[in-house]
């Protein structure tokens, strides 16, 4: 089964995503920020990265840019709950930087699993 790296500064969200994805048989790694996520992905590149946008240390847009620069074939799903300008603007930026799919928080299980399956199946077809 595919490996998925979750990058989010909120430990509760990471645990929730991990539980949902592991129940589906995915291997899951977690990182609390972009720097940690990049380092994990350098050691063991994931099949898919799910990253939050607004995080301390290294935020999601910068993380997406660095991931796509170092790993041109990386598959990314970006998630955001908003911030000052709302999630739509952040998620559009994430797509511009290389995210294949975007999800607004709060994340629902069905939407998450559909996005993951779609991104991973698209990569298998290529």
Image: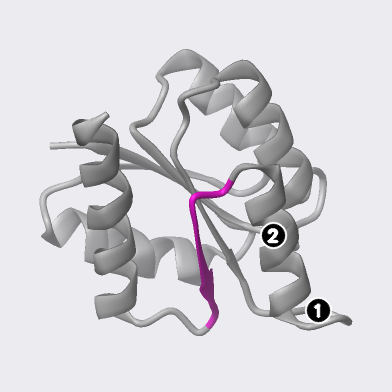
**Do the numbered discs 1 and 2 sit on residues whose CB atoms are within 8 Å?**
yes
Q: Specify the segment rendered in magenta.
A: 99-105
Q: Residue furthest right?
A: 84
Vertical placement of 118 versus 30: above or below?
A: below
Vertical placement of 41 versus 27: above or below?
A: above
Q: Earlier in the sequence, mark 1 or mark 2?
A: 2
Would you call the spot at circle 1 few (<14 residues within 10 Å), some (14-19), or many (20 or more)?
Answer: few
Task: Identify the residue shown where x is 53% and y is 17%.
Answer: 42
Task: Identify the residue shown where x is 77% and y is 83%.
Answer: 86
Q: What is the x, y in percent for residue 115?
A: 33, 62
Q: What is the x, y in percent for residue 66?
A: 71, 29
Q: In the image, is 4 to the left or to the right of 59?
A: left
On-image quarter of the N terminus: top left
Residue of label 1? 83
Task: Give the quarter of the image for residue 46.
Answer: top left
Vertical placement of 2 versus 102: above or below?
A: above
Task: Identify the residue shown where x is 27% and y is 29%.
Answer: 126
Q: What is the x, y in percent for residue 111?
A: 32, 76
Answer yes or no: is residue 11 visible.
Answer: yes
Q: Which residue lies furthest to the front in this view?
A: 126
Q: Residue 53 carries which label?
A: 2
């Amino acid at each position: 089964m595919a490996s998925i790296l979750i990058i989010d500064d909120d430990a509760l969200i990471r645990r929730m995503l991990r539980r949902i994805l592991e129940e589906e048989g995915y291997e899951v790694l977690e990182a609390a920020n972009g720097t940690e996520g990049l380092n994990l992905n350098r050691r063991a590149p994931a099949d898919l990265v799910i990253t939050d946008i607004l995080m301390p240390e290294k935020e999601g847009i910068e993380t997406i840019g660095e991931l796509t620069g170092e790993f041109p074939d990386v598959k990314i799903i970006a998630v955001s709950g908003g911030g000052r300008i709302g999630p739509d603007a952040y998620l559009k930026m994430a797509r511009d930087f290389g995210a294949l799919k975007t999800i607004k928080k709060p994340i629902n299980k069905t939407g998450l699993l559909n996005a993951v399956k779609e991104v991973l199946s698209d990569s298998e077809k290529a």
